[in-house]
Image: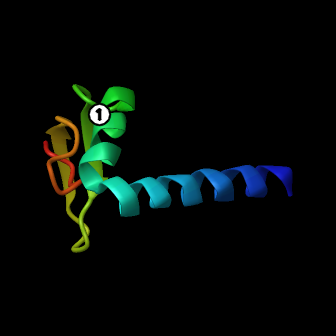
Amino acid sequence: MEIFTKVRMRILEKLNILQQKGLPEILTEWRRKDMLAGKWLQWLTNSGEVVYGLSEGPDQSGRLVG
């Protein structure tokens, strides 16, 4: 239960930042901690197609650029 409580607190903390300061504040931290930036990724689309690309991190809307 302790892990759930900690995760819940962190999510609520980030939601509070999002509400008060907007997405740019979240994106700054995301880009600083992004372990996938510059790495090749693969993912599955809704239609079942496998897509490959080099991760360039999130765009201004929070969508993955690659």
Q: Name the outermost residue toward the bottom.
A: 47
Quadrant position of the N terminus in the picture: bottom right
Q: Secondary structure at mark 1?
A: helix
Residue 35 image point, x, y percent: 38, 28
Q: Nearer the viewer, residue 34 or 17?
A: 17
4 left or right of 65? right
37 left or right of 54? right
Q: Amino acid at mark 1?
A: Arg
Q: Name the outermost residue toward the front.
A: 20
Residue 37 image point, x, y percent: 26, 30
Rendering quarter of residue 5: bottom right
What residue is shown at x 27% (from left), y 39% (from top)?
41
Residue 54 vertical position relative to residue 49 in the rendered view, above or below: above
60 left or right of 62? left
What residue is shown at x 38% (from left), y 59% (from top)?
20
What residue is shown at x 18% (from left), y 44% (from top)?
52
Q: Nearer the viewer, residue 17 or 38?
A: 17
Rendering quarter of residue 22: bottom left
Q: Nearer the viewer, residue 33 or 10?
A: 10
Give the residue pinned by disc 1.
31
Instruction: Tell me how many marks there are.
Output: 1
Q: Name the outermost residue toward the right.
A: 1
Residue 32 image point, x, y percent: 33, 27
Report the colour scheme.
Answer: rainbow
